[in-house]
Image: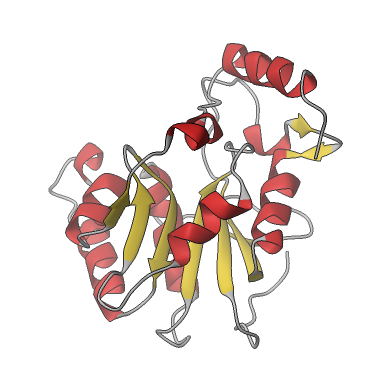
Amino acid sequence: MKHWQAPTAAGFVGIVLAGGRSARMGRDKAMLPYRGRTLLEHMAALLQASGACRVLVSGPPRTGYTSVPDRQPELGPLGGIHAVVTTLAGTPDSIRLLIVPVDMPALSIPTLTTLLQLSPGIRACHYAEHPLPLGLALDETVRAQLNRLMEDTVRPAAERSLHAFCSGLHARVLPMAREIEQEFAGLNTPEEWAAFRAACDAVPAP
């Protein structure tokens, strides 16, 4: 496992959320083969191609990656984001994060980089009906909102969600253009994965 180093170049920190149990898929989604590499490799490369100066992977240790395990299990994406933000403690508040799930390989660079156009006062940005991928401007307000949700053990886990986090930050919600809808296809079951692969096989790789 690689150790975290604060970024020294302009850009953003890319985060791949790969800590889920993949229960419905029946196997680790991060290791599914996609166009000659794994989904994890593809998503990390996509973040780098989008301009990430560093990529972290939330979840169990992954060879060749800076892995950040969840500090509180069973909280889904919120738990993964919390673990990474905790790891980034002490870094400048100007850091931007671009957070992607490991199972959205159809996402494009323009779709992702649009999320990083955060104006002053806008700390989070995502597309309508999809809290992921998520652009985030890391500052004390973001850290405090995240910590409040993580520490509120009275609230049911279902309410300590990424939706609640984005709502609390008054996230900017971008309209979902019809031409990018297919980039957000869910890949949670073997049937969805098979359909996605069949569609990919019908289109040459870029």
- Residue ID at (59%, 77%): 11
Q: Is residue 204 above or below residue 76?
A: above
Query: Does residue 161 appear in the picture of this structure?
Result: no
Q: Position of residue 161 (x, y in %)?
A: 28, 45
Left or right for 102, reference 146? right
Q: Is residue 10 above or below residue 15?
A: below
Q: Position of residue 107 (x, y in %)?
A: 59, 42
- Residue ID at (66%, 39%): 30
- Residue 205 found in image quarter: top right
User: Which color scheme did the rendering employ for the protein?
Assistant: secondary structure
Residue found at the far left of this picture: 154
Residue closest to the eye, 114 or 144: 114
Left or right for 185, reference 170? right
Identify the image quadrant of the N terminus: bottom right
- Residue 138 found in image quarter: bottom left
Q: Position of residue 7 (x, y in %)?
A: 62, 82
- Residue ID at (77%, 24%): 203
Query: Does residue 199 appear in the picture of this structure?
Result: yes
